[in-house]
Image (cartoon, rainbow, N blue to C red):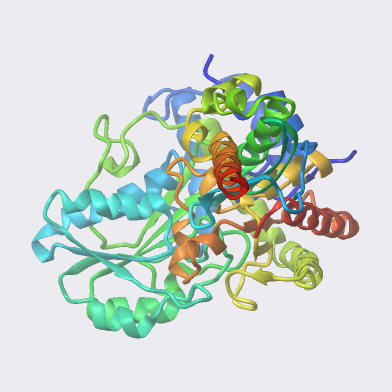
């Protein structure tokens, strides 16, 4: 039976064109980009080329404002802790939405130990940040406000431009985690008014092990990794050349193909949503229209998400995700589902489908059948 | 090596659970867990001369919650109620070739549900004996 992968938000396969692009470099070997000899300079050139490509994906002023990291988690840590600590004289408050990624929330919680205050901005039942509340909560001494561009679990796209206006009127810097959104919807850091932006290589079909942080000219932050002063002194450590050149090429390819691909996936997504919502007591989580084109997320009453995941995988070879407590390391249901107002018992029954290049419209009937039969089977087993 | 994911046996019981369903007017009924925590299971037993003749379950929960429920019904069937009372969480996990550590407590309530059902049966038996006197 053919495999159908619907968990692109968790991990994506590398675009084979990136392997072709990387092959000659991998075979000839890399010099250390910090070395002054010809091999080192060639590596330096590769990194600068990748920087330009990443900058173009988000319309940054110049490649010089992009620094490479090991991934989105590190970018989020650096953006939040680095900026908050460097600007500590301007204030000791940070803010984020109730649905932001755990690496953002935990970076901010870490700052509590240094005497910072953390403000959580609520979202509505569809996951949209309440800009009125944001306006009430932020003060001049809120140095970093971090809001994700789009949510990985419920697909909701935030009104970033509007949020940026509030942040710049009331607080200081806006950091945006664009891990889930980049390559799916157009991002323009200049017109969106973004000061810092996180990107992940593997979320745009690039290799794992690379991420990037856009830092707007003039924004000051301090490093969290110290050493030889690579990446403008903000991220020491010899660069992961394969991952970085792969991320650059992935950015170039996805920018070029985004409109067409997002249109294609949007059609599949809408058909899936329409059909799955016909199941009794099936509900969409997140926003019905302000939603990532590759994202469909649901909850089903009376059943549990890990069982959904296992059943879809074992019986139908379809890989999905869930925000159920039973799959998390903390055994707590997803903070995102609780933040949009779901009760614990409802949050347990979630299923997230994230589409990508490997999916096609012909898979829809198989997916629908699998979801229907899975829900039916688990409900028969359930006493609720 | 530490156990990664579920054993083959857990997955087999999850995919083909034994003794699913309910028993009308059961001799014993036990229910444990809570949908808020993500696990809820109920067990029905039919008992004759203190031997568990039939047992059924229904479970809301994750893969291990369903697999342990299925396994406990298999272990209990045909046993004397006093023997069945001795089946504990570790027995169920062992019979399934182990459970991931974090699943040992939250999703391994099936033996508790069985014990509740047996207690219910014994309670009913006492009442009926008293009524017969």
Residue A303, relative to residue A140: is it above or below?
above
Left or right placement of residue A352 versus residue A236 in this view: right
Residue B19, relative to residue A144: is it above or below?
above
The outermost residue toward the front is B133
Residue beneath the point at 20% across and 69% down: A142
Residue beneath the point at 82% across and 41% down: A315
Q: Nearer the viewer, residue A38 or A331?
A: A331
Q: Position of residue A98 (x, y in %)?
A: 38, 65
Is residue A29 visible to us here?
A: yes
Q: Position of residue B63 (x, y in %)?
A: 65, 40
Q: Quadrant of residue B116?
A: top right
Which quadrant is the C terminus of chain A positioned in?
A: bottom right
Residue beneath the point at 77% across and 54% down: A380
Left or right placement of residue A247 versus residue A101 in this view: right
Q: Nearer the viewer, residue A215 or A307?
A: A307
Which quadrant is the N terminus of chain A positioned in?
A: top right
> How many circles with numbers are drawn on the protein?
0
The outermost residue toward the left is A89
Q: Quadrant of residue A323?
A: bottom right
Q: Position of residue B8 (x, y in %)?
A: 72, 24
The outermost residue toward the bottom is A132
Q: Quadrant of residue A279?
A: bottom right
Residue beneath the point at 46% across and 64% down: A338
Q: Position of residue A123 (x, y in %)?
A: 42, 74
């Amino acid at each position: 039976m053919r495999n159908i992968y619907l968990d692109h938000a968790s991990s994506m396969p590398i675009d084979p064109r990136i392997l072709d692009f990387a092959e000659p470099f991998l075979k000839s070997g890399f010099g250390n980009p910090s070395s002054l000899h010809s091999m080192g300079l060639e590596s330096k050139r590769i990194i600068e080329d990748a920087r330009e490509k990443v900058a173009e994906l988000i319309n940054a002023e110049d490649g010089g404002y992009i620094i490479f990291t090991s991934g989105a988690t590190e970018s989020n840590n650096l953006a939040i802790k680095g900026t908050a600590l460097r600007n500590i004289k301007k204030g000791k408050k940070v803010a984020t939405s109730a649905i932001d990624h755990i690496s953002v929330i935990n970076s901010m919680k870490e700052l509590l130990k240094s005497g910072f205050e953390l403000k959580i901005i609520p979202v509505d039942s569809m996951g949209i940040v309440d800009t009125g509340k944001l306006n009430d909560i932020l003060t001049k001494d809120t140095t970093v406000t971090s809001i994700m561009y789009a949510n990985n679990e419920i697909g909701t796209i935030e009104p970033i431009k509007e949020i940026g206006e509030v942040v710049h009127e009331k607080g200081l810097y806006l950091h945006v985690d664009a891990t889930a959104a980049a390559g799916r919807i157009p991002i323009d850091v200049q017109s969106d008014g973004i000061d810092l932006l996180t990107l992940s290589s593997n979320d745009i079909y690039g290799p794992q092990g690379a991420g990037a942080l856009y830092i707007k000219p003039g924004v000051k932050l301090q490093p969290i990794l110290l050493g030889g002063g690579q990446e403008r002194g903000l991220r020491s450590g010899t660069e992961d050349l394969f991952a970085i050149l792969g991320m650059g090429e992935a950015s170039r390819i996805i920018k070029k193909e985004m409109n067409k691909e997002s249109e294609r996936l949007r059609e599949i997504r809408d058909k899936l949503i329409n059909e799955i919502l016909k199941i009794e007591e099936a509900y969409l989580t997140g926003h019905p229209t302000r939603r990532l084109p590759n994202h469909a997320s649901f909850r089903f009453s009376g059943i549990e998400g890990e069982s959904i995941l296992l059943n879809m995988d074992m019986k139908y070879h379809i890989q999905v995700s869930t925000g159920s407590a039973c799959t998390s390391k903390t055994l707590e249901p997803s903070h995102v589902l609780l933040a949009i107002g779901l009760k614990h018992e409802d949050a347990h029954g979630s299923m997230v489908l994230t589409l990508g290049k490997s999916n096609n419209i012909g898979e829809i009937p198989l997916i629908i059948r699998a979801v229907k039969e899975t829900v039916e089977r688990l409900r028969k087993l359930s006493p609720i | 090596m530490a156990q990664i994911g579920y054993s083959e046996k857990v997955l087999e019981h999850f995919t083909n659970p034994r003794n699913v369903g309910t028993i009308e007017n059961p001799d014993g009924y036990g229910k444990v867990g809570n949908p808020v925590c993500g696990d809820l299971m109920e067990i029905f037993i039919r008992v004759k001369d203190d031997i568990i003749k039939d047992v059924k379950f229904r479970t809301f929960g994750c893969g291990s919650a369903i697999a342990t429920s299925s396994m406990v019904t298999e272990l209990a069937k045909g046993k004397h109620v006093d023997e069945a009372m001795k089946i504990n969480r570790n027995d169920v996990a062992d019979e399934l070739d182990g459970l991931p550590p974090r699943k040992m407590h939250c999703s391994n309530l099936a033996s508790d549900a069985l014990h509740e059902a047996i207690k219910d049966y014994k309670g009913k038996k006492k009442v009926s004996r008293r009524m017969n006197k």
